[in-house]
Image (tube, rainbow, N blue to C red):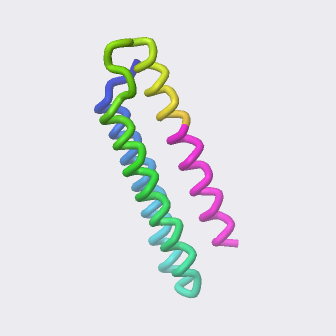
């Protein structure tokens, strides 16, 4: 299992990628600023939710449940980031 530190770095990296791509979209398409800002807010909300879940595992006494908890966080992270990139691509069309 990867460390909590690595998980948090992955979360930060992926959210930073969404935010930086959003800034580029705003730069090249200023008329789409409102929808892009909404995507950025969703990205920050996703980051905060994932951090909160990572810092507070459900059951600390049962390592098997903790492992499942962190696997679910990683799965939710990938699905959430994928959805945000999809939304950003739709705005760029």
In the rendered structure, the answer to whether residue 28 lies left or right of residue 52 reads right
Q: Residue 82 in the image: x percent, y percent?
A: 60, 49
Q: Quadrant of the N terminus?
A: top left
Coordinates of residue 36 in the picture (x, y in percent): 53, 73
Q: Which image quadrant for residue 23? A: bottom left
Secondary structure that dominates the magenta span: helix
Instruction: Name the residue rendered at 37%, 34% in the picture.
Output: 7
Q: Does residue 2 appear to the left or right of 22 in the view shown?
A: left
Residue 89: in magenta span: yes
Rendered residue at 51%/71% (across/down): 38
Residue 83 within the segment the image draws in magenta: yes
Whether 21 is drawn above or below 2: the answer is below
Residue drawn where x is 45% and y is 66% of the image: 41
Query: Is residue 16 left or right of 80 when viewed as pictured?
Result: left
In the image, 91 versus 21, the foreground residue is: 91
The location of residue 62, given as percent across then percent down, is 38, 12
The magenta-colored residue range is: 76-93
């Amino acid at each position: 299992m990867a460390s909590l530190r690595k998980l948090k770095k992955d979360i930060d990296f992926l959210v930073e990628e969404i935010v930086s791509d959003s800034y580029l979209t705003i730069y090249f398409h200023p008329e789409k600023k409102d929808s892009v800002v909404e995507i950025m807010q969703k990205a920050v909300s996703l980051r905060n939710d994932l951090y909160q879940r990572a810092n507070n595992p459900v059951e600390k006494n049962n390592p098997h449940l903790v492992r499942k908890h962190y696997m679910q966080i990683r799965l939710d992270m990938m699905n959430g980031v994928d959805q945000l990139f999809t939304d950003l691509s739709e705005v760029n069309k």
